[in-house]
Amino acid sequence: MIKNYLKIAWRGLRKNKGFSFINITGLAVGMAVAMLIELWVWDELTFDRFYDNESRLYRVMLNRTANGTTTTQSNGPLPLVDALRNEVPEIKSVTESLTTSLQADDGLQVGETKILRKRQHVGEQFLQQFRFPMRHGNWTTSLRDPNSIVLTEETASALFGAADPMGKLVRLNNQFDLKVTGVLTKLPANTAWDFQFLVPFRQYELNTPWMSGSRMDWNNNAINLLVELQPNVDDKALAPKLKGIIKRHYPESIFEVFLHPVSKWHLYDEFQNGKNVGGFIGYVRLFGLVGLFVLLIACINFMNLSTARSEKRAKEVGIRKSAGSLRSQLIGQFLIESLLVAGLALVLSLLLVLATLGLFNGLTQKQLSLPWREPVFWLLTLGFTLITGLLAGSYPAFYLSSFQAIRVLKGSVHTGRRANWPRKLLVVAQFTVSITFIISMVVVYQQIQYAKQRPVGYNPDRLMMVSLTADLSRNYEAVRNALIRSGVVERVTKASSPATTILNDTRIDWAGKASDEIMRVNLVSTSPDYLNTMDTKLIAGRDFRTDGADSLSVILNEAAVKAMRLQNPLNQELTMVWDPSRKLRVIGVVENSVIESPYDPINPLVLAYNPSFENTIIFRLRNGITTQGALAQIQPIFQKFNPAYPFDYQFVNDEYGRKFRQEELVGKLAGVFAVLAIFISCLGLFGLAAHLAEQRTKEVGIRKVLGASFLSVWGLLAREFVWLVGIACLIASPIAAVFLTNWLDNYSYRISLNAWVFVLASGLALLIALLTVSFQGVRAALVNPVKSLRSE
């Protein structure tokens, strides 16, 4: 019986090639979109889920409550390590973690081979906690020696080729010779860890001056702490014990401790007032729904076109029922036909996925692939196809099988207005989703552009940064002079933070601060010429002198002046809590600069004169010189004074642009899905318009004989669908407004929704719909009425 059903279904597809093409293409595009999104969503949901002990791995987080507001941070004080080890038996192990290269990579050298790679300093038990697969070495001893190094496979290959690296020396940053004690296999792409080699935290602690005494300093929150719980320990039951552990050792502390599981590091990384409020998981859920909606639009196409052609199959149903066919058999036949279409669409969708996966990976910055050899993939894919076929074919199957044989054979079954209503509702639903996508795409683009056009408070054009290594720090004045003499560099300075990142903050006190007030500010230590190099506007006072006389002077930004409630900030004294005996004097005020998120308010900033506290060289290229020409002049200078490193640099414009990556990804995906949703909807609309034109052929012929004009005939068919799209516009607008308002509320610096966006999106949808149905309208209007009335 099934074989017979398949034969009938195949004949039907061949007989109605146009409608079959629309059905299969629409379903295939919808399935391909759903499949791509499914791959992306699965990749996101499985981030850091490959550890054997994943349920017991946590990051130590701190909540800081000050002035009625709670903020959350992932870095804590080093003494907390011993406190957790000694006082909390529910914790199996604690390890330190520190990313020291916040702007650029570190230099590794073996012989004449020099490469730049990402470093991570970790405690001795790190590998035992996370159990990364190792090609050489073991979890227990590889990080025991402070002067050891563990490489990833790729890094080992770059340094040693095919040779065995174990026991060999690698020079780090032209300062330290470290022995290779382990090689990790390639890390999965979907992990929050992006290191390319590991160095024991003890090595950093022993060789970094500011770390001296850190094991006793509860004020220095600079280290990430990672813990593994004992088996069967409930983190929620443990929470009260951890909460006040810092205050028990340091009563003045304003920090409370809690644990954040490894499975949530990537997707649940946003905190508001001390509570986790989600994060990127919101976008994952959103695009998961988008994939389902696009597939639903494709299924609606199938339903609409199948029921629209019911009159052509009515007699077939009547004859089969008269011959004794049961309704269940007819339903089975129509569902088999639907599953055949879904099966053909699956084949086409897999081809589409293969053809577009490279582009999709480029768009999402992923390394996704179809897991052909995984049985689970095929089970899910076939199940997905089965559900799609049943979903798309269920309504047509039950609708067509409900026809009464006697009425059908008498010719009294016609699809009038009542029969058309379900199809009209489905068309409205299709375009409601599509128009919502269009509106969202426009608003996301507006928000990104609004943030990009925000005044940043300095001039990022032709501004470059190079990470300060030990060699560059030692030879800074020589480097600076050589850059100026090159003729391509206008100004040079150095600072403790890159131009697009804040690495340090501190608490300050000043006369006039309330006794219960806690004030934290961003802190950037600079050398002379920082303001001129950045092209930051000084609105009061003066810049730092070049003779070193301003070691006790600071410059505030406008946000700091406002937060401190200073009417006359110049000559105001302030102190930093880590050195209250050191009185600092305000000598200037600068305009606010956007250094952190372009979507958030600007935080108070203190610029301090401290050239020895450094991280980055910042310099500005002269105007009128090509970038390539300037780089050709600059590169030899850095190679001379920084011989252990390849020349590595960043343009501030590029680094600032990276702050928009997440929103740009959302905007691009929204745009792609909007186009595909409209395409699928228009495929269905085209098919329905063709059916309507065919259904009303004789009516059109009579109207033309009676003198109807070309435009009136065209309008007869076009208005049937345009008003449905108009209703969809009215429904989509408030839905999009509610969704987008909630999305924009995540940003402090944001646009307001404008009515013209909804008008534009609605007008665009109406225009696309009009163009889609116009082909059939024009075709019907141009048909010779003699041909259409010949059979009458």
Image: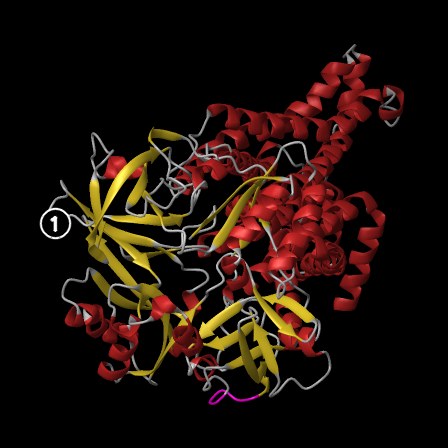
List x then y, in percent, for residue 602: 36, 40
Question: Any magenta on residue 140?
Answer: yes
Residue sticking out furthest to the top: 707
**Which residue is drawn at the image coordinates 71% and 44% (left, top)?**
628
**Which residue is drawn at the image coordinates 80% and 52% (left, top)?**
12
| Dominant SS in magenta | loop
Nearest to the observer: residue 734 or residue 524: 524
**Which residue is drawn at the image coordinates 79% and 27% (left, top)?**
697
Q: Count neighbours of disc 1 (C-alpha within 10 A) and say few if under 14, some if 14 to 19, many if 20 or more.
A: few
Nearest to the observer: residue 82 or residue 89: 82
Q: Is residue 647 left or right of residue 656?
A: right
Residue 388 seen from this side: no
List x then y, in percent, for residue 430: 58, 40
Residue sticking out furthest to the left: 515
Which kind of residue does numbered mark 1 sit on?
Asp
Question: Element under label 1?
Answer: loop
Question: Any magenta on residue 74?
Answer: no
Q: Which residue is mark 1?
A: 516
Residue span colored magenta? 137-141
